[in-house]
Amino acid sequence: MAFIEVSSLTKEFKIYKRKSGFGNVLKSLYHRDYEIKKAVSGIDFNINKGEVVGYIGPNGAGKSTTIKMLAGILVPTSGTVCVDERIPYKNRKENAMHIGVVFGQRSQLYWDLPMNETFDLYQKMYRINNAVFKRNVEFYVELLAMKDFIKTPVRQLSLGQKMRANIAVALLHDPEIVYLDEPTIGLDVVAKDRIRHFIKEINKEKQTTVILTTHDMDDIAQICDRLIMIDKGRKIYDGSLEYFKQTYSTGYMLIVDFQNANENLFNSKFKVVKEEGTTKWILFRKEEISAPEVVSYITQNFAIRDFSLKEPDIEEIVRHIYEKDIQPVAYK
Amino acid sequence: MHYIDLYFQFIKINLKSMVEYRSSTISVALAEATGFFAQFGIVWVMINQFKTIGSWGPYEVLLLFALNLLSYALASFFVARLSNGLPNMILMGRFDEVLTKPMNPFLYLTCSGFSYGYFCHVIVSIIVIVMCFAKLCIKMTALKILFFIIVVISGALIQASASIFSAVPTFWMIKNSSLRSLMFSLSDFIQYPISVYNKAVQIVLTIIFPFAFVNFYPAQYFLEKSDFLMFSPIIQFLSPLVAIILFVGSYLFWISGIKHYNSTGS
C-alpha cells in the first residue's frame, strides 16, 4: 500500500448560472439554474513516502481542489483518497496532526505579533514536546535565515519573510507530509531560492513527503523528482521530470552563427526553425541525431563563427501543452 | 484539558495583539461602556416616566435588561468569532485553515476567537444587576445565588445558540446578513417584559425563538412574581433545559453545515 493513494477521485461543484438583464435577475431570486462543474474528475495516483512531487496545471485545472481533498478540507464527490492509511475527511483531526499545509496566498501568522508567538501557540496546538519544539525552531530559523526578524511583528515583514515564517509554522510538528500550494508565488529570485533549498533540506533530513503546486517551472526543476500534470480536472502526465522532457519536448535547439548568410542547410534529421541574418536556430531530437553529430556535420560543411546549445526548457514544454490542449498520453 | 491549556494560550496571544493597539483598545472600551450606560439611562428615563411597564417596576425592568445584556456578552466572549466572523471566513475561503488544524472546528473558533470587546458589557451589567437586587431588597440565599448563576449560564447558551443558528446557513448561502439582523431584532424584544406585547409575540418568544427564557421567566423567581402569561409557573425553572436543547440543536446544525462546506478557489 502506497503512502498516499488516490483513485478515481472526483469533485463536483454546483455553479449557478447568471444571466444578464433585470428580468432574469428577478427570476433568479426564486429559481436558479445550475450546472455541475467537475473540478477534479477521476484522478489516480500513488505517492510513496519521501517523494517530492510537483503538481502542476493551468489555473482552474483542479490543483487546489485536489490538495484540499488530500488535506481533509473537502469531501470528494466520488472516488477514494487514502493518506497514510487514513481517510482525510473522515479522520480529519488525526490526519491534520500528521500533515502541514501552506497556502501561498494566505498567512497563518498573527498579524500584530512576532512570529515566535505563533510558534508558541502551535506548540500547544500540536502538543509538540519541548525538546522537539526547541530543536525545530532553531533548525528552521537557521535554515531559513530568520534570525534577524524573528522578533519583528509580522505586519512589518516582507512577503518573502512572511512566507518563510509560514512554512516554518507548518513544519513545527514534524509532519510526515507537507502540502504547499504555490509557496513561491510573488517572491523574488533570492526568496524563491531560499524556500527551494529549505524544502530540499527538509526532505533530505526528515524524509518529509512534499506535494507542491506551482506555476514556476524552476520550482519543479530544482526540487521535484516527479511531476504530475493535470488539466481540466484530468491527469495528463505522471512520471519523472526527465521522461517528461523527453516525451513532450520539441527538442534541443542549436543556435549557430554562420560566416555567410543564406547557407543552405538540408537534413532530414533536423530542422531550421528560425533565421535572423547569419544566425540560424536548428531544432533536433536526441533520439534521431546526437548533439555532437549535428555540430560536426555543420562545422565540417560550413564556416561558422559561434554556436550554442539550448536544452529543452520545461517552461516552454508546459506552455506548449497548455496551449495545444494536448490530451492524455501514456503515463509512466 | 488540552483545550483549556490552548484556550489560555489563545487568550495570551490575543491580549498581546490587543496591547499592540493600546490606545485603540482603551478608546473602544470607553466608547462601549459609555454606550451601555446611556442605554440603561434611556430605559431608566422611560420607566420613570411611566412608573411601571405592564406591572413591572423600574428596577425589575432594569434587571431584565441587564440579564439580557450579561448573557449576551458572556455568549459573545466565546461565539463572537464563530458567528460574526464565519460569513466572511467562508466567503474568503479562510475556513480552509480552520479545517487544517488538528482540532474540533467549533472549539477552535471559540478558543481562538476570545474577544475582549465584551468585557465592558459584563462589568456594566453586573453592576446594574447588583444595584437592582439591592434596591429591590432581594435576600440572596446560597440556593438563589446558585440558581442565578445557572440562569446566567443558560441565558448565555440560549444567546450563543441563536448566534450559531443564524450563522450556520452561511455554509449554504455564502451571504446571509438578513438572518442575523432578524435574530438581533427578535432579541431586542426581551429588553422589556414580554407581557406587554400581544399574545402572538409572547408565543413566538417562548416557543419558536425562546429568548424569553433568558430573562423574563427566570427573573420572576427572584422577583417573586407570577406573570407567566398562558403558561404553567414551572416555566420559571425551565431555562437550563431550554438552553441545553437549543445548544445541542445548534451544534448539530453546525456539524451539518460543515459537511456542506465547499471552500473557494485560490
Image (cartoon, coloured by chain):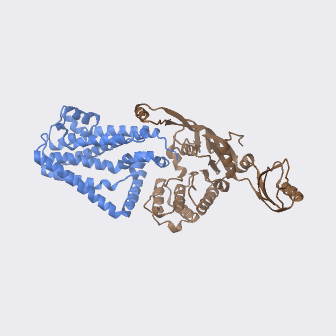
x%, y% of residue A47?
Answer: 64, 46
x%, y% of residue A285?
Answer: 79, 49
Q: Is residue B34 above or below residue A11?
A: below
Answer with left or right where residue A62 lies relative to residue B15: right
Residue occupying the point 42% across, 54% down: B6
Residue B161 visible in the displayed image: no
Q: Quadrant of the N terminus of chain A?
A: top right
Residue occupying the point 19% across, 52% down: B128
Answer with left or right where residue A253 lies relative to residue A298: left
Answer with left or right where residue A78 lies relative to residue B201: right
Residue A88 visible in the displayed image: yes
Answer with left or right where residue A5 lies relative to residue A152: right
x%, y% of residue B80?
Answer: 35, 49
Q: Nearest the camera: B215 or B198?
A: B198
Residue occupying the point 22% across, 49% down: B66
Q: Nearest the camera: A84 or A51?
A: A51
x%, y% of residue A178?
Answer: 57, 51
In which quarter of the view is residue B188 placed?
top left
Q: Nearest the camera: A18 or B95?
A: A18
Task: Tell me what hue chain B is rendered in.
Answer: blue
Chain given the colour brown: A
In which quarter of the view is residue B180 placed?
top left
Q: Nearest the camera: A14 or B215?
A: A14
